Image: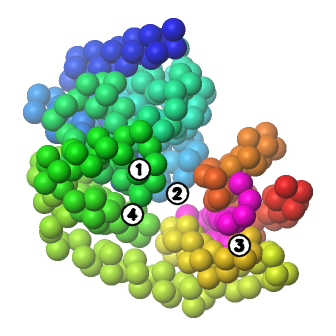
Amino acid sequence: MTTHSLTKSCAKVREFLNNSERLVVIHHWDSDGVASASIIDRSYHRDREIYYVVPRIGDYDPKSSIDIEYIKSLEPDLVLILDYGIPAQEVMNISKTLEKPIAVIDHHVNECLDELMCNPLAYGLSEDNYPSTTLVLRNLIGIENSDDLVLLGIIGDIGWKYRETPLSKWIDSRCRDLGIEIDDLFRVSRIIGSCYRLFRLQELSRLRYELSRYGVKYIAQSNAYNHVIEDLDREVRRALEGVKVLVDRGNLKVFELESNYYITSLVGRHLAKQFRNSTVVLINYVRSLGRSYAYIRSWSKDLSKLIPKLRAQGFLVGGKNYVLVITCNSAKCNEIDRVLKFIDNM
Ligand SMILES: [Mn+2]
């Protein structure tokens, strides 16, 4: 029953896409989001106008991250949201403001909208079978000319964990067929990661274009983006030198950092590796976003159990088994004390 409704919704999204003449695509800034937008571009750019919009990087509140007036001014007949897992209610709000149909293609856990939502996870299917939005585009929208980009989305979102999914064999064999190494996928993913972490929006949209027209292998072999990777490495090194210790009580270490770029998770990961025996917390104020993020990593506790509890308390939180990232309400992230109490009680 659920898969039947999912198939129906996806067929409807496909139908709207095929009939659209002026399309606005809002896509997540990460590898899966960019690869998904490139897939749409590759399949549809020839016979319609397509405009691409990247939400303000690091911002998951569509009220501030998406310029609705700008989208309105483009007068689209359809707005497509790719891989940007905002709550279903927010999608409804955007749809009401624009008075245009909105379609969602995604694989983030979400409530189910009545229509135009092609998201297997909203219909209760497993993330293991749908580790990326690019794979939703392939298997549920039925786009078959873009497996290089499908693979990029998967590796971008789950990295080496792909080996533990039911798709492992398919991924390896598609790579072989297409002459793509897993390392190529990691490299392109790193280029995209470097662009968005440094807010290089122009390069990000050039990547979307080049990936669509020339493919993943071309970008993997190109040296044109080396400078972005180098710039990011330098920023992370500089940040690690500027990190301050706020709390150090053995099993818990809290660090503080001010940065110009969106490098919270990279710096947090470095610290977590350095202090494997502690729960590591990094509070990172990103100046250009005027906002703080708290990165929390534990090697011994399954933090994902906390996500629903924290959400119920009004926290804006995302994460995986051993990592949480919280978007804070204040520069100092005062609410972190409440989060740490939750962790202490685990
Ligand atoms: Mn994704």
| Separation of marks 4 and 2 at Cα, in angstroms | 12 Å
Q: Does the segment drawn in magenta span residue 328?
A: no
Q: CA gap, disc 4 to disc 1?
A: 18 Å
Give the magenta-colored segment's residue range: 281-303
What mark, if any, has residue 162 been given in the picture?
1
Q: Which of marks 2 and 3 is nearer the N terminus?
A: 2
User: What residue is drawn where x is 24% and y is 36%?
Assistant: 40
* In this rendering, position of residue 308 left or right of residue 71: right
Q: Mark 2 points at which residue?
A: 58
Near mark 4 (Cα within 10 A), the count class, few <14, some 14-19 or many ≥20, is: many
Q: Which element is circle 2 on?
A: loop
Where residue 89 appears, x then y in whole percent? Answer: 60, 27
Instruction: Please give the name of the residue rendered at 52% of the width and 57% of the height, measured from the top-left corner.
Output: 58
Q: Which residue is drawn at 41% across and 85% down?
A: 234
Kindly state the secondary structure of the residue where label 4 is placed.
helix
Q: Foreground residue, 52 or 12?
A: 12
Name the mark nearer the viewer: 4 or 2. Answer: 4
Label 1 vs label 3: CA separation? 26 Å
> Mark 1: is the Cβ under 8 angstroms from ligand 1?
no
Q: What element carries label 1?
A: helix
Q: Name the residue under label 4.
A: 193
Dots 4, 2 in contact, CB < 8 A:
no
Mark found first going from the N terminus, 1 or 2: 2
345 to 144, vertically: above or below: below
Amino acid carrying label 4: it is: Gly
Q: What element carries label 3?
A: strand
Tags 4 and 1 touching, CB below 8 Å: no
Q: Which amino acid does label 3 sit on?
A: Val
